[in-house]
Image (tube, rainbow, N blue to C red):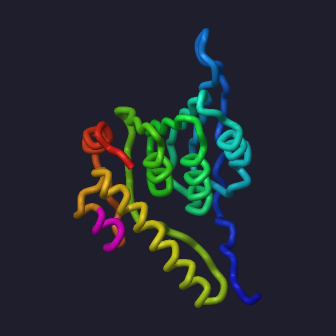
Amino acid sequence: NGQNLPMPRPYGGNPPVITFNPKGEGETGNIIKVHLVGEIGPITQFVELLEVFDSVTENDVIEIYIDTPGGDVYTTANLVERMTNCPAKVITIASGLVASAGTFLWFYGDDRQVNSWAKFMFHCSSHGDFGRSLAVLETSEKLVKYMRGIGTDMLGAGLLTREEYVKAFENKADVWPSVDEVQKTINGMTI
């Protein structure tokens, strides 16, 4: 039909490591630990995690340990959508570098935690689409709008200041808040 579809990103990345542990005696459900380490690659590396999001109940808890420089924004958007719509409680834990797409995966957890050695970086998306110029332009405009919506959510929750929002989502720069700054804001943060 003459439209270009976004092309797969040239990322490697690793599938997350997922473990299932029953809750304590007398409790129903599982504690599901997900270790997401390294670049966020194509969605095909996350099929098992998508199945987890689709199969959990309100008795389950998912803990996602995040240590990523970011990666595929389309994959991350799909993960966030499934994660926020699953009935389990999802705890996102910044366990190392949480940058780019990793920040919005972390941000949309039901409960957000930060290890003392974590490091954050926020910015608008980067991408490498190719194809017809007008299709690339259209994709870029939609992606900027989507990312600014995430930035607005972060601003509204108090995670970003107005100046940081402008820097990241209007001035094309990276924002590196300290762990202490992030830790102070997450205690009262709601989405």
Percent x, y of residue 110? 46, 40
**Which quadrant of the view contains residue 25?**
top right
Q: Whole-percent x and y of residue 187? A: 30, 37
User: Is 16 placed above or below 79 here?
Assistant: above
The reply to whether the magenta stretch includes residue 168 is yes
Task: Give the residue at x 39% y 39%.
Answer: 118
- Magenta-tinted stretch: 165-171
Horizontal and vertical percent position of residue 94: 44, 39
Query: Where does the image place residue 139, in percent across and percent down from the top left?
Result: 57, 78
In this figure, what is the number of numbered marks?
0
Question: In the image, is residue 32 above or below residue 52?
Answer: above
Q: Which residue is situated farthest in the right direction here? A: 1
> Which quadrant is the N terminus positioned in?
bottom right
Relative to 93, is 168 on the left or the right?
A: left
Residue at the image point whose x is 57% and y is 58% from the top? 77
Residue drawn at x 45%, y 66% is 147
